[in-house]
Amino acid sequence: MNDISPGQFNLVSNAFSFTIAAMGATTLFLWLNRSLVAPPYRMAVTISGLVTAIALYHYVRILQSWDAAFQVMGGQISVTGVAFNDAYRYVDWLLTVPLLLVELILVMRLSKAATVSKSVRLGLLAAAMVLLGYPGEISDQAGTRWLWWGLGMIPFLWIVYELFVGLRDSIEAQPLGARGLVNAARWLTVGAWSFYPLVFVLPMIGFTGGTAAAAVQVGYTVADIVAKAVFGVLIFAIALRKSEQEPVAQAT
Amino acid sequence: MNDISPGQFNLVSNAFSFTIAAMGATTLFLWLNRSLVAPPYRMAVTISGLVTAIALYHYVRILQSWDAAFQVMGGQISVTGVAFNDAYRYVDWLLTVPLLLVELILVMRLSKAATVSKSVRLGLLAAAMVLLGYPGEISDQAGTRWLWWGLGMIPFLWIVYELFVGLRDSIEAQPLGARGLVNAARWLTVGAWSFYPLVFVLPMIGFTGGTAAAAVQVGYTVADIVAKAVFGVLIFAIALRKSEQEPVAQAT
């Protein structure tokens, strides 16, 4: 990270600032439009906005930490000696990743018992996945990184299994007009989440130095925007579609 | 930009501060009055406020970056060596310019299929226009600037064509009392947006140094206020006019 160029520094700064704007706008969009969906779906929309609000907070911190780590003067960059704090991402994920799965479960409107049991199981798996990734993230030894990467992949694959096998019947029971969107939300989760272990691996397969550091930061940032903001708007679209198809619920 | 005068520095600072106030006030106006329009038009008003809120955020960043780039002491100005970050504008436009077209489409209340297809097409064209402008903006070579300017003009002219030909029938189908306002919104879009490529060209046709730098900043700022804040209030006026003429929608 010490041989980052001024251009790479700016690219990462601008990506962080873009994310702050995108997360803030998505939060406001979701909360302002919450009343447009029927009451049974409002909790899903509220939580979608909470996830982007938590991410907004952490990206403000991440940008501050990034700015504190480097100094750009007259086209030259130098490290200040203040370390960039990688932990903000993991703290963010520990809060938001379980909530993302809860959003999906809530908008499907399963039975109360199924909602609770699936939320607890998927939420704990998601938290375990994030916690197992962190010891690898802060290590610069490839062996240690691979070990924790492999351990983190166990709950990740379990979540994928739950989404595709455990939720299959529930997705087939969704109203016809919403089934395609719920399926898209499931695929977006698996697709966007797969991006994180790939970005994690970059430094272990030869990508080092400033280019790798910038690629890791921009990679996580893009994945966060898709997994949280785009996903949140998709959850809102599902809630809106289902509200339109359930006139009884709407009249509540 | 190095030979800017203290007066020019202050003019630009004050223009940025004015814009922060105008964008913030417009955001609050739109969201506070959102319930005055009928439910089918609330999404258009919500998004109009989101656009000015995103611009508010970026103008705070732009003003901070401007202040960090120069130091004024005892009537003398000097550059600090910290570069003014031009990218904030492009990051802002990447988010807001597609949303401005979505506002216009939403307030017209087309069929669902037409709303989605036109929003996606115009949104992608708008994003392409902004992305193609950026490599030219950061270059100080006239040839490179003209190349990307020309490439960016292709999606711009396509958008103009869509607004005047693609939306012609839809505008003629608007209720009589709102048709004039929708037409005005269309013209305001084309007029205000034409301002950006003109400002972009200033440094290529001989305007250089402090005067040109100040003119570019003030020019973009005025264009942003018209294209986002004035346009947002116009969208609200259309929504209000249409709500009055559609008692059925209002009763929902």
Image (cartoon, coloured by chain):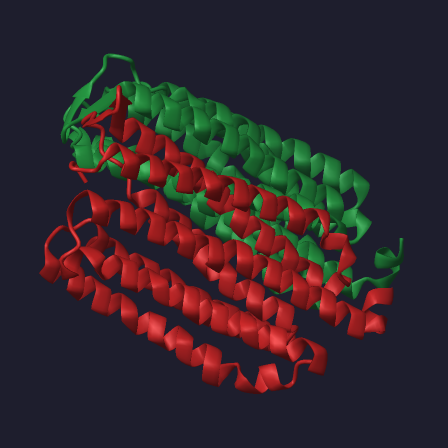
Chain colours: A green, B red
Could you tell me which residue is drawn at 27 percent across and 39 percent down? A11
Q: In the depicted view, which residue is nearer to us: A183 or B42?
A: B42
Q: In the depicted view, which residue is nearer to us: A8 or B24?
A: B24
Farthest-out residue, top: A81
Residue A39 location, x and y as percent? 81, 48
Q: Is residue A146 visible?
A: yes
Looking at the rendered image, the quarter that the N terminus of chain A falls into is top left
Q: Is residue B106 left or right of residue B32?
A: left
Q: Is residue A82 above or below residue A133?
A: above
Q: Is residue B123 above or below residue A122?
A: below
Tell me how many marks there are.
0
Q: In the depicted view, which residue is nearer to us: B3 or A88?
A: B3
Q: Is residue B192 left or right of residue B80?
A: right
Q: In the depicted view, which residue is nearer to us: B163 or A139?
A: B163
Residue A166 location, x and y as percent? 62, 47
Q: Is residue B181 above or below residue B140?
A: below
Q: Is residue A219 left or right of residue B212?
A: right
Q: Is residue A164 visible?
A: no
Q: Is residue A151 left or right of residue B84?
A: right
Residue A61 location, x and y as percent? 44, 24
Q: Quadrant of residue B53?
A: top right
Could you tell me which residue is drawn at 22 percent across and 33 percent down? B83
Could you tell me which residue is drawn at 29 percent across and 36 percent down? B7
Residue B180 location, x and y as percent? 62, 78
Could you tell me which residue is drawn at 32 percent across and 47 percent down? B217
